[in-house]
Image (cartoon, rainbow, N blue to C red):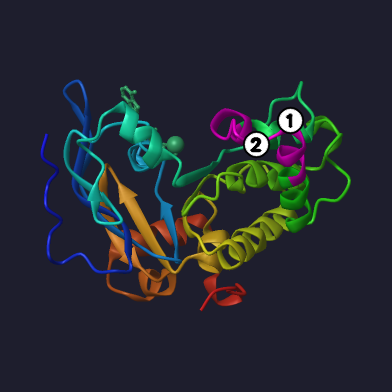
Amino acid sequence: MKEPTPPDWLEPDDHVVFDRVTKSFGSVQVLKGIDIRFKRHETAVIIGGSGAGKTTLLRCLIGLEKASTGHIWVNKRDITPLGEFEMNEVRQKFGMVFQYAALLDSLTVLDNVAFPLREHRKDLSRKAVKDRVVTMLNQLGLFNKENNMPSELSGGQRKRVGLARALMLEPEVLVYDEPTSGLDPLTSRMVDDLIEETREKFNVTSVVISHDMTSCFRIAHKAYLLIEGEVAAEGNPFDLINGDNEQSKEFIRKSGISPQSIDRIVD
Ligand SMILES: Nc1ncnc2c1ncn2[C@@H]1O[C@H](COP(=O)(O)OP(=O)(O)OP(=O)(O)O)[C@@H](O)[C@H]1O
Ligand SMILES: [Mg+2]
C-alpha cells in the first residue's frame, strides 16, 4: 500500500503528531479526533480524569493499538497503515516506563534491564550486554545494584531500574504511564527530576500520563487536558490556569494544588 504524503504543515521539530486521531472499541468512540503535536526534546504531560482516554492515547502512540481513523506522524511518516513487521521497528523508537516500574520480581536487576537487549540485540555477547546494563545503571545513579532483586530496592530505585530498561534500546521518545502514582511526595519530586534529567542527558522527547498536578506544573512544556476523548485544553500549565478555559481551571482547582508555590524545573 502506498504510504500517505505528509501534510505541508508538519515542521522539523514535530516529533510525533496526532492528526485527527479517533479510536473506537465496537460502537464506543473513546478518542474523538485528537490533534497533538509532540515537539522534539520537549515534555508533554497528558492529564485528565479516569476513563478520559489517556491510556488508549498512549497505546496508539506506541503502536500497541491501531487508530480507527486519522494519522500518527512519527518523523513525518504515518505509522497508522503499517503492518506488524514495520510496526515492530517503529516501536523501538519508543521507550516505555510503566506504572510501578513493572519489574519481574523473580529476576535480578541485571536480567530485568538486559531484557530488551537480549530480545532485540542478539548480536551482543553476554559480556557486552552486562557492560551496557551496568553503564546505564551507573548513569542513572544506581551503583552495585545489578545483582539485587527488585524487592530489595526502594520505590525510587525501582523507578530508575524501569527507566534503565526503557533506555536500553536508545529510544527517541520516552513514554511514562503514571510515573509518580503510589510514591510518597518526596520520591515523586525525585521522579520529576529524573524525568527532566533523562530528557536532557539522553536527548529524548518525553510524553507523561499523569494524575499528579504538581508534577505537571514542574516538568511540562505543554500540558493537554483530555476530557471524554477530546483535548479540552492545551498549553503551558500556567496558561491553563490563567487562561480563559473554564474546564482546565476547574480541573486544576479540584486537584487542590497551589501553582504559585511550585518550583518549576523546565523553562
Ligand atoms: N480494549 C478496550 N475495549 C473496550 N473498551 C475499552 C478498551 N480500552 C479502553 N476502553 C474504554 O475506553 C475508555 C477510556 O479508557 P482509558 O483506559 O483510555 O482511560 P484512562 O484515561 O486511561 O483512565 P484511567 O485514568 O482510569 O487510567 C473507557 O471507557 C474504557 O472502558
Ligand atoms: Mg489509564
The residue that label 2 is drawn on is: 124
Within the displayed image, which quadrant is ligand 1 positioned in? top left
Q: Main SS type for the magenta part?
A: helix
- Residue type at mark 2? Leu
Q: Nearer the viewer, residue 170 or 254?
A: 170
Query: Which is more foreground, mark 1 or mark 2?
Result: 2
Q: Is residue 153 magenta?
A: no
Q: Quadrant of residue 59?
A: top left
Question: At which x and y percent is residue 3?
Answer: 14, 43
Q: Is residue 257 visible?
A: no
Image height of 80 relative to 256, above or below: above
Residue 213: assigned label? none
On whether ligand 2 comes within 8 Å of the CB at mark 2, the answer is no
The kind of secondary structure element at disc 1 is helix
Q: Nearer the viewer, residue 126 or 112?
A: 126
Image height of 154 relative to 17, above or below: above
Q: Residues within 10 Å of mark 2 (few under 14, many from 20)?
A: few
The residue that label 1 is drawn on is: 111
Query: Is residue 224 shown left or right of residue 11?
Result: right
Alpha carbon of mark 1 to alpha carbon of mark 2: how far? 15 Å
The residue at the point 33 percent across, 50 percent down is 226
Q: Residues within 10 Å of mark 1 (few under 14, many from 20)?
A: many
The kind of secondary structure element at disc 2 is loop
Q: Is residue 127 magenta?
A: yes
Q: Quadrant of residue 165?
A: top right
Image height of 26 relative to 135, above or below: above
Quadrant in which the N terminus appears: top left
The residue at the point 76 percent across, 21 percent down is 106
